[in-house]
């Protein structure tokens, strides 16, 4: 296994050393997308397959001044056709990473999940948000899931969400990530379903039903990420204070928590959708250039470690 | 109405100018509590009624070197008796602010909510977390609710949560606070109950069922607090980008979001429980000295504006 990736600078270094990857972009049509492609092409061993309207693509490429040797254009008459063609190309092994351009996320996810898509891996698709947590000793990468895709997160779904996040941790060289199942308290409270599910997930991990990680919960955020807060509460747990993966209680909670690390704390971020045969990137319009580059690097690095990225 | 309180420095200034307030502390017994009392007594026009074991209280006062003229001690033989006596004193108008010492929060809340307590105000008790949001032009106080008390937050409860938070905004001189009902998306999605409830709360505000504020939702966190993010999404709303109150989707989400502003962003904080006849403070052991002082100042300032703090 390669060296462990513990920071975003580690990730950029590691991703710049992988074998060349083909990143397929579904219907690139806006400035941010082309700028992101140009920056990634400039610093990572990637070639880009651009599927969409050739005229629009050539215009975009000109403004972003991209090296033509890293680019291939595939003609699609419409947005819908671009999605179809992209999925077919991914199925046929022509791409290592799938990246959303100007397409609705829901439309792209539906196409990936379609029974006949050929790119499903049999499980749930879920969004993994990664942020770099500044620590005195050494910064750490921490994940939050799932604030983007999975609307209904019941116990069964949460098992899948943990498994998907764990594949990302494994790809980054963390063989046994610590998963904190978040709630508003560290006590099991019958009236609070998230605490009951957290207990169940911990026990499933103990019984070998969820493997490759250490799961503990319920934990409130402070107990999950601050060793001092965990110690003050007297919580004895291998996860408390040093969680690598934060499983939030709901899509709303994961979404708000992830955005809080960006908008309030100003942390760097990357995000990737896991659960298909290849990593899928769904950059948001609000993503910074740095976040776009880090997300491409994350997708490429996961593609380099396919056993990890597909369970 | 007094000048508007827009930052925590404003709050400390404003609270130091109120008529002397009596802060009743239920069973003070640990160092942090006495240190908090000493700091508040040193900078705010408060006297403290300490209800508990007199020996333990005198020991605590000595280590914290408090001015005896600001202190009165009330003898209670046990923790349970301290709670009973405190509630009775509050009911009889002997206290302006109630503050938790070494007592379980649930025990204290139950005593306040008890039918015969005499300190109920008829509505829900809920926790209002306030943080100072650094902005280029001017910092702002933003509230998050309810991450501490209300386990089940259905539509009916959410109406009460908004009303309670609005009383705090009113006490701070914000006559028409902007309330963002948070979700993971700004679209109403039938499968996502929080988005449906957000739409209902917005409409209830339009119809005059929730007054004294402007409610809009669903909004994701970035759309609620960043004017740029709201503009990028094309969201037209008087709330988007400039929310004063963030109604999270659940207790877990409010708890994680509030802790994120403290542990990740390093923002200053205060918190107060609203809905009883007087403000109730439930400092957490992890609260910093600054947070304890700001919370006492908030409680005192709310007590100075009783029509605002009791609806």
Image (cartoon, coloured by chain):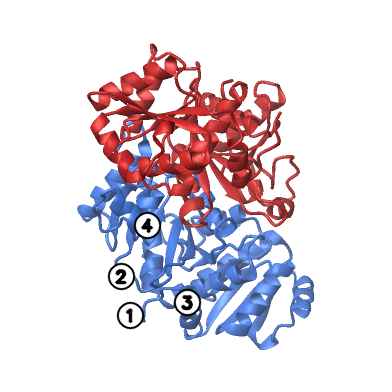
Chain colours: A red, B blue
Give the labeled residue for mark 3: B11
- The total number of labels drawn is 4
Residue under the image location 49 percent in, 64 percent down? B131
Residue B18 percent coordinates (x, y): 47, 84
User: Dividing the image into 4 quarters, which one contains the C terminus of chain B?
Assistant: bottom left
* Residue at the extreme left of the image, as rendered: B207
- Could you tell me which secondary element the residue under label 3 belongs to? helix
- Could you tell me which secondary element the residue under label 2 belongs to? loop
- Mark with earlier residue (1, 2): 1
Q: Residue B208 lies in what quarter of the image?
A: bottom left
In the rendered structure, find residue B175 and report the number of the disc placed on it: 2
Give the labeled residue for mark 1: B1
Estimate the spatial distance between the alpha carbons at disc 3 and disc 4, rounded to whole Å: 24 Å
10 Å crowding of disc 4: few (<14), some (14-19), many (20+) = some
- Mark with earlier residue (3, 4): 3
Q: Chain of mark 1?
A: B
Q: Given contact means CB atoms under 8 Å apart, are the residues at marks 1 and 2 in contact?
A: yes
Q: Given contact means CB atoms under 8 Å apart, are the residues at marks 1 and 3 in contact?
A: no
Q: Given contact means CB atoms under 8 Å apart, are the residues at marks 2 and 3 in contact?
A: no
Q: Residue B1 lies in what quarter of the image?
A: bottom left
Estimate the spatial distance between the alpha carbons at disc 1 and disc 2, rounded to whole Å: 10 Å
């Amino acid at each position: 296994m390669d060296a462990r990736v513990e920071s975003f600078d580690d990730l950029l270094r590691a991703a710049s050393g992988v074998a060349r990857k083909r990143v397929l972009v579904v219907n690139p049509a806006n400035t941010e997308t082309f700028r992101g492609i140009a920056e990634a092409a400039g610093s990572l061993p990637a070639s880009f397959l651009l599927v969409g309207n050739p005229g629009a693509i050539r215009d975009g490429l000109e403004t972003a001044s991209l090296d033509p040797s890293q680019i291939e254009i595939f003609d699609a008459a419409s947005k819908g056709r671009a999605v179809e063609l992209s999925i077919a190309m991914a199925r046929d092994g022509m791409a290592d990473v799938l990246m959303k351009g100007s397409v609705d996320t829901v439309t792209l996810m539906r196409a990936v999940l379609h029974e006949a898509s050929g790119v499903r891996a049999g499980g749930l698709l879920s969004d993994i948000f990664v942020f770099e947590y500044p620590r005195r000793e050494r910064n750490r990468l921490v994940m939050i899931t799932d604030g983007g895709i999975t609307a209904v997160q019941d116990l069964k779904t949460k098992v899948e969400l943990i498994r998907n996040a764990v594949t990302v941790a494994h790809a980054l060289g963390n063989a046994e990530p610590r998963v904190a199942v978040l709630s508003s308290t560290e006590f099991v409270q019958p009236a609070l379903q998230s605490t009951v599910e957290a207990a169940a997930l911990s026990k499933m991990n103990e019984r070998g039903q969820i493997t490759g990680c250490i799961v503990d919960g319920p934990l409130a955020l402070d107990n999950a990420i601050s060793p001092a807060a965990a110690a003050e509460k007297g919580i004895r747990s291998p996860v408390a204070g040093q969680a690598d993966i934060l499983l939030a209680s709901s899509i709303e909670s994961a979404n708000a928590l992830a955005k809080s690390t960006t908008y309030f704390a100003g942390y760097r971020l990357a995000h990737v959708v896991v659960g298909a045969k290849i990593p899928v990137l769904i950059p948001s319009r609000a993503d910074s250039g740095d976040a776009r580059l880090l997300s491409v690097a994350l997708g490429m690095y996961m593609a380099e470690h396919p056993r990890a990225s597909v369970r």
